[in-house]
Amino acid sequence: MSRKKLIAGNWKLNMKQSETKEFLTSLIGSLNSSNLKEVEVMVCPTFTSLNSAADTIKTNKANIILGAQDLSQYSSGAYTGEISAAMLQEIGVEYVLVGHSERREYFKEDDSVINAKLKAALSAGLKVVLCCGESESTRDSGKTDSWVSSQIESALQGIESSGLATKIAVAYEPIWAIGTGKVCESSEANRVIKVIRDKLNQLIGNTEANAMRILYGGSVKAKNAEEILGQSDIDGCLVGGASIIKEEITAIIAAAAKLKVSL
Ligand code: PGA
């Protein structure tokens, strides 16, 4: 079974609507359409730019997936400032990031909130990029494997495993490698990703675990993409900083298109 590579751009708190339109139009123009057949490409703008991105993708008939960076765990009601899964879907959002370390750290999202957000997304029909990863001190104390395994286990608590591989992609993002320029050694990223796949195997069974894509994220750039994507178990990348630099993300997508993942 082969897993099609996914390159997802997490734009974070960048790009107003006008900038989104301009950037995305230019990115679409520079993407090689045959690359887009080999690789799934996703952009995750901030909430207020989702509409602008959806319009730009539609106008250009581009084969690009729209993702959101967050969603509410609630479907409606008195939750000031929140945005529900159904509201995202109405705009044309297909995926949502859940469990990103910046949400965990700066917005105090714990395992139970992440589990609730995952359930809210899936029950509304949204797909999820589920992020996990250890801090530098967890790594230094030799607890990386148990840490990421437990993040995955808590996130998937109470979630029906059937068909899950088509609804979730996992992203392994060591926190110390995010936005720091310190990329995790590709062989080590591959090793941790195998640990995650073993855990998935235990939790949701072999078929779903083997079909589920597991991405790497953390200081992915044009210059290291090929090396990372060439690893046996890395099925794509979640790209932050480099995803809003056209030359960088274009080169990362091209690197993914050159490689095929097979089991
Ligand atoms: P980075 O961010 O590529 O800037 O390190 C990755 C992420 O936060 O998803």
Image (spheres, rainbow, N blue to C red):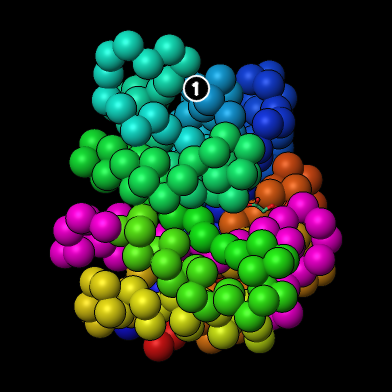
Q: Quadrant of residue 189?
A: bottom right
Q: Residue 29 in the image: x percent, y percent? A: 66, 42
Q: Is residue 126 visible?
A: no
Identify the residue at image location x=39%, y=41%. Answer: 113
Image: 3 above or below 112: below
Type of the residue with mark 1: Asn
Query: Residue at label 1?
Result: 51
Residue span colored magenta: 157-186
Identify the residue at image location x=27%, y=25%. Answer: 75
Asked whether 158 falls inside the magenta stretch, the response is yes
Q: Residue 261 in the image: x percent, y percent? A: 48, 80
- Numbered disc total: 1
Density class for disc 1 (Cα within 10 Å; few <14, some 14-19, many ≥20) is many
Q: Residue 212 in the image: x percent, y percent? A: 36, 70
Image: 187 above or below 66: below
Identify the residue at image location x=28%, y=38%. Answer: 120
In this rendering, position of residue 136 left or right of residue 132:
right
State the predominant SS element of the stretch in magenta.
loop
Using the image as rendered, state which of residue 194 and residue 153 is in the foreground: 153
Image: 43 above or below 129: above
Identify the residue at image location x=40%, y=88%. Answer: 263
Q: Quadrant of residue 173?
A: bottom right
Q: Is residue 54 visible?
A: yes
Element type where label 1 sits in the image:
helix
Q: Residue 6 in the image: x percent, y percent? A: 50, 61
Position of the N terminus by quadrant = bottom left
The answer to whether mark 1 is within 8 Å of ligand 1 is no
Asked whether 27 falls inside the magenta stretch, the response is no
In the orientation shown, which residue stands out farthest toward the front? 141
Q: Quadrant of residue 104?
A: top right
